[in-house]
Image: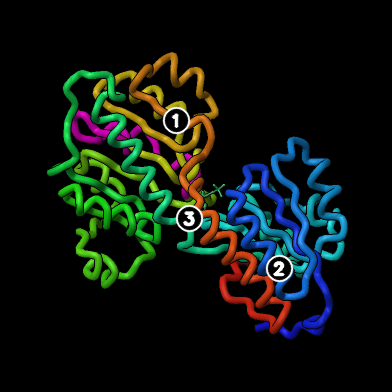
């Protein structure tokens, strides 16, 4: 908790989303904000950063998705007190710049996890059934699934994978052993072991200096024959040149991603149907996930303004 003296002051809460929430989620956010006595504002589908800079001018709180909030945005918003990333990964917010300016940054962990987990299986079924082209494909039942990280999204992936009858392993350096036991998932001791022993590897690591470019030739090239790599995490965790080169050598491997490669055209040209990427990041793009994450963000902001609650702050 922090000591906030402005609990009865009307605050301006701006929802700034290049990729809009479902309308029902926007309505829900608006109701919460107005119901708490604050002002609601919305900017969606903006194309230029200048539009965001103008919109934040008098905002006290921001609700964003993957929208980039850097020092320039913060400097354009002198009254800004809190930024809530409606979602899990907050690599799009310059947390150090926020801390320097006394701005609280939060995320809404777990709120969109099921949506992302379901997309993993959407892409997997599409791939193993040969993009529904009529040729005989394969099944997920009995295949070995490896989860790289074991937070909210991969725990949901594991739950669904059990229904498919997959054998599930996971690696997470930060997750206590009891969680693997509780979820009945085999804990492996290194990413290398996961890649070597799993037919499907699903990535759920955040983008950090430690993880960027970490999915490299050594890992990808060690996958069993017919291996499938699924990425619903972040594009920059992939070492793209090594992914493309390895998959050119290993023509049995496939890469399915909710994030286009920076070298998307090159990927399509060199890997053909073995590379699939959604045209726009779709993992969290369901009405349910938008409602869960958007309303959580609104409630967190109102709680912060009401009594200084800083639960879910990520820039401490
Ligand atoms: C997240 O980190 O929560 C997901 O990547 C969803 O991102 P999005 O809100 O931009 O769809």
Q: Are marks 1 and 3 in contact (CB under 8 Å)?
A: no
Quarter containing the C terminus: bottom right
Instruction: Write down the residue under mark 2.
Output: 33
Q: Could you tell me which residue is drawn at 38 percent across and 43 percent down? A: 119
Numbered disc 1: secondary structure: strand
Identify the mark nearer the N-term, 2 or 1. Answer: 2
Labels 1, 3: front one: 3
Q: How is the image coloured?
A: rainbow
Report the residue marked by disc 3.
288
Q: Which SS class for mark 3?
A: helix
* Chain part drawn in magenta: 211-228
Secondary element type, mark 2: helix
Name the foreground residue: 230 vs 315.
230
**141, above or below 292, in the image:** above
The answer to whether mark 1 is within 8 Å of ligand 1 is: no
Horizontally, residue 8 falls left or right of residue 30, namely right
**For mark 1, what is the residue?**
277
Judge from the rendering whether residue 44 lies leftward or rightward of residue 230; answer left or right.
right
Residue 71 position within the rendered picture, expressed as x and y whole percent measured from the top left? 77, 53
Q: Is residue 216 magenta?
A: yes
Residue at point 42%, 49% (across, down): 116
Q: Residue at x 83, y 74 (%)?
A: 10
């Amino acid at each position: 908790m922090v000591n906030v003296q402005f609990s009865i002051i009307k605050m301006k809460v701006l929802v700034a989303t290049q990729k809009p929430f479902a309308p029902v989620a926007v309505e829900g956010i608006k109701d919460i904000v107005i119901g708490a006595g604050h002002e609601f504002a919305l900017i969606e589908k903006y194309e230029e950063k200048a539009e965001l800079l103008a919109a934040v001018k008098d905002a006290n709180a921001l609700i964003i998705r993957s929208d980039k909030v850097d020092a320039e945005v913060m400097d354009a918003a002198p009254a800004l007190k809190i930024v809530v990333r409606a979602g899990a990964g907050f690599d799009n917010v310059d947390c150090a710049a926020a801390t320097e300016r006394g701005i609280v940054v939060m995320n809404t962990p777990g709120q969109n996890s099921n949506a992302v987990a379901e997309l993993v299986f959407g892409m997997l079924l599409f791939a193993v059934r040969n993009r529904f082209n009529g040729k005989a494909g394969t099944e997920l039942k009995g295949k070995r699934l490896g989860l790289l990280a074991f937070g909210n999204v991969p725990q949901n992936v594991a739950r669904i994978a059990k229904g498919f009858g997959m054998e599930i392993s996971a690696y997470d350096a930060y997750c206590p052993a009891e969680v693997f036991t509780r979820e009945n998932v085999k804990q492996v001791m290194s990413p290398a072991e996961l890649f070597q022993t799993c037919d499907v590897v699903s990535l759920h690591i955040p983008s950090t200096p430690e993880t960027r470019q970490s999915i490299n030739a050594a890992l990808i090239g060690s996958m069993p024959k017919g291996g499938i790599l699924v990425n619903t995490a972040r594009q920059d965790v992939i070492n793209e040149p090594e992914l493309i080169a390895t998959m050119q050598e290993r023509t049995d491997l496939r890469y399915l991603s909710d994030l286009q490669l920076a070298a998307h055209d090159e990927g399509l040209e060199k890997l053909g149907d073995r590379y699939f990427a959604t045209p726009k990041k779709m993992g969290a793009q369901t009405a349910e996930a938008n409602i869960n994450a958007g309303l959580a963000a609104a409630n967190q902001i109102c709680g912060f303004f009401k009594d200084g609650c800083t639960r879910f702050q990520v820039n401490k």
